[in-house]
Image (cartoon, rainbow, N blue to C red):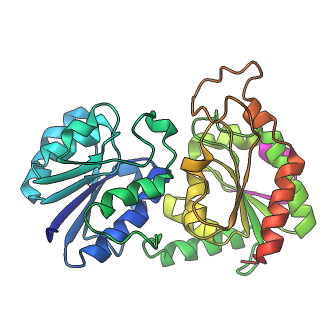
Amino acid sequence: MADFRRILLIKPSSLGDIIHALPALSALRRRFPQAHITWLVKREWAQIVEGHPDLNEVIAADLRWPSWPRLVARLRRAQYDLVIDLQGLLRSGLLTQLTGASVRIGFAAGREGSRWCYTDRVVLAGSESLAWRLIPVHAVDRNLALVAHVGADVTRPRFVFPDLTQEDRRVTQMLGDHGIRPGDRMIAVAPVDRHRVRSWPLERFAEAAAQLAALWQVKVVVLGTSGQREIVQPFVRRMSSGVVDLVGKTTIRELAAMLRRATLLLANDSAPLHLASALGVPVVGLFGPTSVVRARPYGDRHRIVRIDLPCSPCDRRICSNAIQYECLTGIEVAQVVAAARTLVESSGADH
């Protein structure tokens, strides 16, 4: 096996997918402790990997086509001898090929023709006859398969994050302003998925959160992006009291620090769900059209709530069922509350 010295990982987006790639990075670092490892990521997501202890460099890139000449020139100057495309799409595949690296690894089932850009194509179990969205392999394990191809030990996946000390201080101040002190329990809720079609109804999120807050005598912290502020307002109004609205008020790194303080996260299949599970925070995940096998919270300290339907998972953004989004609207508040109680009370989570 070659002793690669200059390695590039290509995983531009999005936040949840980047988190799923972190164990692959750490496994690769253990395999090549002396290598110079670079991660290419879109600028808007770069902060989650900047300062990462297993990285030497982060390229926070603008991937719009006009920026390509300068970006490709930079990649070629770096003279990588190994490039791993963890994205598996046309643009990431083309960037992989344009680096000029002698070894270029990607998924044999890569989409949009990306597979033709690689020197080494890794076949995932069960991928031979299935569409990408139906391959029964978790995203974390999918990424680990690529680094295993160069001899990395992937038997003990680890999520490693940059140092969040500064973010911890800011979050402590932020929560303190709302009466939540270090050591206090709290419930975090991320009620909106960026695609919206994977979102449980807001009024049910609010009812479940209110019941749990009353049961445990804790406050509820609602999280989301600035673009979700208006969408989340019905949740905030329905909660009426005991809710701390931090939607759009945290950076990505502050979101991570915030989640580490949570006793529990209630969320749809979304970036906060994957970030929380990677941080070891107990998660109750509500799943509708997406595959639990491929996108569940990684690890054991979590509960999935879903209903079985012949059409689910479909992984589509437009519902073709006679009862629109029945896979989500069929989930009852009582199911979510019961799952949360079982998870927290059985694990003794007290953060």
* Lateral position of residue 268 relative to residue 95, left or right: right
* Lateral position of residue 215 relative to residue 37, left or right: right
The quadrant in which the C terminus is found is bottom right
Residue 323 vertical position relative to residue 216 in the rendered view, above or below: above
| Residue located at (32% from left, 63% from top) | 148
* Lateral position of residue 311 relative to residue 104, left or right: right
Q: Is residue 196 magenta?
A: no
Depth order, front residue of 241/59: 59
| Residue located at (79% from left, 69% from top) | 344
Residue 192 in picture, x, y percent from top left = 66, 43
Residue 254 in picture, x, y percent from top left = 54, 65
| Residue located at (79% from left, 34% from top) | 329
Question: Magenta part of the protein: which range?
Answer: 234-245
Q: Is residue 235 magenta?
A: yes
| Residue located at (66% from left, 56% from top) | 246
Q: Is residue 239 visible?
A: no
Depth order, front residue of 176/208: 208
